[in-house]
Amino acid sequence: MNLKVMDILKKYTMTLALIAVIIFFYANTGGKILFPQNINNLISQNAYVFVLAAGMLLCILTGGNIDLACGSVVCFVGGIGAVMMDANINEWVAVVVMLIGGLLVGAWQGFWIAYIKVPPFIATLAGMYAFRGLSNIVLQGYVVGIRNETFLNVFGGGADCYVPDFFGGANMNITCMVAGVVIAIIYVASVIKNRISAQSKGYEVAPLYSELAKMIIICAVVIWIFYKLANYKGIPAALIWIAVVLLAYAYITSNTTMGRYLYAVGGNEKATRLSGIDPRKIYFFAYVNMGLMSGLAGILTVARATQAQPTFGQGYEMDAIAACFIGGASAYGGEGNVFGIVIGAILMGVINMGMSIMGVNANYQKVVKGIVVLAAIIFDVLSNKKKK
Amino acid sequence: MGKVILEMKNITKTFPGVKALDNVNFQVEEGEIHALVGENGAGKSTLMNVLSGIYPFGSYEGDIVYNGEVCQFQKITDSEAKGIVIIHQELALVPQMSIGENMFLGNERGKKNAINWNETYSEADKYLKMVGLSESSRVLIKDIGTGKQQLVEIAKALAKNAKLLILDEPTSSLNETDSRALLDLMLEFKKQGMTMIIITHKLNEVVYVADKITVVRDGSTVETLDCHTMEINEDRIIRGMVGREITDRFPKRSNVEIGEVNMEVKDWTVYHPVYAERKVVDGINMNVKKGEVVGIYGLMGAGRTELAMSIFGKSYGTGISGTLYLNGQEVNLKNPREAIEAKLAYVTEDRKGNGLVLSNSIRVNTSLANMEGVSDRGIIDMDKEYQVAVEYKDKLKTKTPSVEQNVGNLSGGNQQKVLLAKWMFTDPDILILDEPTRGIDVGAKYEIYCIINDLVKAGKSVVMISSELPEVIGMSDRIYIMNEGKFVGEMKADEATQENIMACILQSGRGE
C-alpha cells in the first residue's frame, strides 16, 4: 500500500505541485487568483503556450530536441497574415497561407535537422534569428492592425471574444454551463465504456476505487471551471482551439503509429532504425508539425492582440519548452505526454498570474520561473536515477 | 620461484542473475608475463576490472594482495597510484587531441591551473621513445594508425609509473607486423623488470610471450601452466579452455526436414563505415536451407555481426558488394524496412543498445517492427496489439506480471524473449540470431534453444551467430567458422569438435 501511494505521488507530482501553488496564491491574493475573470485570462493569455507546447512535445519526444525558432515563426506568420488582411485579402485565404507558411518553415528546419544532421539547437537558433528578421521585413518595422471581424471572432480576437450564449441567461452564461456538464458526461461515459470493454476481453483494469476517484476529481474540476467561466462571460474562443489541439495531440501521441515512432526514436534510435523505421522521417515529421503549430499559435497571437508587431512572440519558445519539461517530458527523449504539458503550462501560467496579482517585481518573477524549471528537471533526473 | 607481486584470493563477483567469477584464485610473480586465456564471457575481463578498481571494493568478495598488502580499491586512480595500470581493448584516446595531451590526460604536468606544455611534450617524447615511436608527441591521435595508437596507450601507462601492466586484447585491432612489434616490446619491458598480464584470444601470441598461463573457464580459474617447466603448445591450451564435455544442455531436434536453399550470399564484402579502407567482411559465400540451423562461429571482432547487419538491409558498413539471393531470386535490400519485407529478421546481440526501447512496455516493443500488423491507416488497434503481446508472452514463456511492464525492468533472459517475440511477429522466413544467449543464465538459455527448435520445425531458417563453442556445436546443423572477416571453414555439426574448430581459426591466423 505504501509503495502504491508513493507511485501515485510520483506519477502526479506536478499535479500536486500545481494544487499546492494554487493554494499558496489563493491564500496570498485573498482568493483573487480563482476569480472567474482570472481563470478566463489564464486560458486566453496562455493559449499560445498550450499550442506551441503540443508541437514542442513531439520534438522533445524524439530525443530532447527543441525548437528555438518557434517564437520568431509565430511573429513571422502572424505578420504575413496581418499584412494580407490589411490588403483586404479574404481572411480564410490568409489563414491557409499562415498555416502553410508555418508548415514550410517547419519543413525547412526539419530538412536540415533530419537529413543533413544539423543539431536541432543550432538549426533552430539560426531560424530564431532569420525569422525574426523576416518578420521585421514583412511588417516593414511597423505595427499592422487587424480589423477583419470574422478572423477576430473565430480566433478569440481582442481579448473579448466568447461563444455566444444561445439560452440568454441573465446572470450566467447558460451555454457555457451546459457545455461543462456535457463534457463531463461524455468523459464519464467513455471511461465506463472502455472499462466494460476491457473487462469483457479479460484485460487488466485499474482498481475501481482509483478509477472512480480519478473520474470524480476530473468531473469536478471541469464543471467547476465552466461554472467559473459561466459566471464571467462564457467560453473564450481560444479555449476551443486549445481543446482541439490538445485532444488531437493526445490522440496522436497515444493511438497512432507516428506517435509510437516518436517515442521509440527518442527511447532508442538504433533499435528503431533496425526495426525498419527511418528515424529521419520521424525527426522531419516532428519539426514540420512544430512549424504547423507555430503557424496556429501565430494566428491566435495576432488575433488576440488585433495587430501584428515585429516584437511579438519573443520568449514564446522558452515558455513552450518550460511547459514540456515541467510537465515531465524527459530531456533525453522518449518520455512525456500531453496531460503533462497541460499541467506544465497551467503551472507556469498560475505562477505568472499569481505573482502579478501579488505585485511581485517582474524581475523576481523571472527568477522564480527559472527556479521552477530547474526544480522540475532536477526531480526528473533524480527520479530516473533511483529507478536504475 | 620469484616473489609473488599480486595475489587474488577467492574472488567472487556476481551480477544480477549471473555469477561472473566464482572463487577465483590468481597469482602473479614479479617480472613475469602472465597470460590469461579463456573463451568470451569466461570472466577474464571481469577479473581484471576487479583488480583495477573498476568494480570497487565491496562489490565483490575475496581479497586482493598486492606487494604484500591487502588492497581495497574504490576507483581506477587508487590502483593506478599503486602502479597497476590497465590498457583496455577499446582504445581510450581522444582523437582530436595530440599524443602528449592524451598521455597526460587527468594527470597533467605542471600546476593545476597552469599546464606546463614544455614539460608535457618533452616527457611525452621520452615515453614515446621507450615504446619505439618516432612520432612527435604534438601529432594528433587521429593522424596516426591504430597500431601506433596502441603504443601510445602503452606509453601513457608508462607515464603513470606502471609496475604491473594489464593489457586486454592489445593486438585485437592490429595487423600481424604491428602485433609482433608489440609483443617484442613486451619482452623488452620484461627484461627491465616490468610485470605484465596479457589477456588475449590469440594463442600463438600466448606461446610467444608468456611465462605462465592461467586458464579461465565459466568464471573459475581452471589451471595455471608454467611455460618453463612444461612443454606448452596451442593444443594443450585449447584443451584447458574448452575442457568440459557437452552434456544435454541442448534440446534435441527431431523430425525437422531440411529443404531447399532459401538464402544465399555470394562474394559479400563490406568495409568499415569510418575507416573506409578497412575490410571488415571479406568475400563471404554462404547459404542457408529451409528448416536448418546454421551456426557462425568466430571470436569477437571476426566480423560476424558486421556480416549479419550488412545483409539485413545494409544496416552496417560502406562499400558493400556481393549478391544476395532469397529463394533463388537476386534481391537488393537497401534498408531494414526492405529486409523485413523480404522476410528477413536480425535479432541483435546488443539487446539494450540496438534491440529494445527499454523505457517502453513489452506490448510496445513487441509490435515495433511490425506496426502494420496492429494498425490500420496509421491508427493503432490497442486491443489487437495487447492480444499480440500476450500471445507471444505465453508462447515464449516470458516471465512478467503484465505486458504493460517496462522492458527495462526485466531480466536479461526475458528481455531476450521480448526481442525474439518482436522479430517473430514480423513473420520472417530467415532469422539471424546474433549471440542469442549472451549474458543470460543457463535455464533461460535452454528455453531460447527450444524456441530456436520450434522455429525451424515451423519451416523457418535460423542463422545463429555465437562465440560459445558448445552452443554452436550443440545447436547447429552446419557451422561456418569465421576469422578476420573471412570464412575459414565449414563443417557439418557431426564432424565438428571444439578442438578442430579452434584449430581452423588458429591455422588461418598463422597463414597471414
Image (spheres, coloured by chain):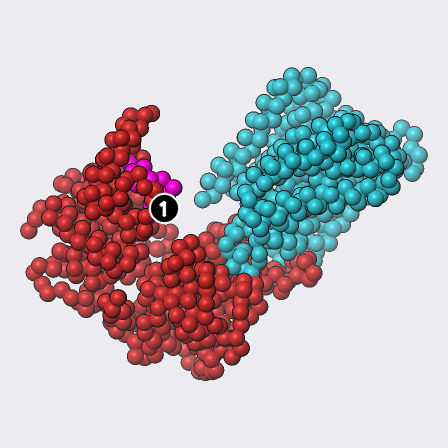
Chain colours: A cyan, B red
Q: Counting other residues with Cα less than 10 Å from the Cα at mark 1, is it few (<14), some (14-19), or many (20 or more)?
A: some
Q: Does residue A160 appear left or right of residue A210 in this picture?
A: right
Amino acid tagged 1:
Lys
Check the residue under mark 1 and report the chain it is in: B
Is residue A20 at all visible to an observer of this figure?
yes
Pinpoint residue B496: horizontal percent, then vertical percent: 30, 76
User: Residue tagged by mark 1?
Assistant: B142
The magenta region covers B91-104
For the C terminus of chain B, the image quarter is: bottom left
Residue B134 found in image quarter: top left
Whether A69 is drawn above or below B451: the answer is above
Pinpoint residue B456: horizontal percent, then vertical percent: 47, 75
Between B442 and B272, the one lying in front of the other is: B272
| Residue in view at x 29 percent, y 30 percent | B117
| Residue in view at x 59 percent, y 46 percent | A112
Q: How many marks?
A: 1
Between A277 and B351, the one lying in front of the other is: A277
Is residue A324 at all visible to an observer of this figure?
no
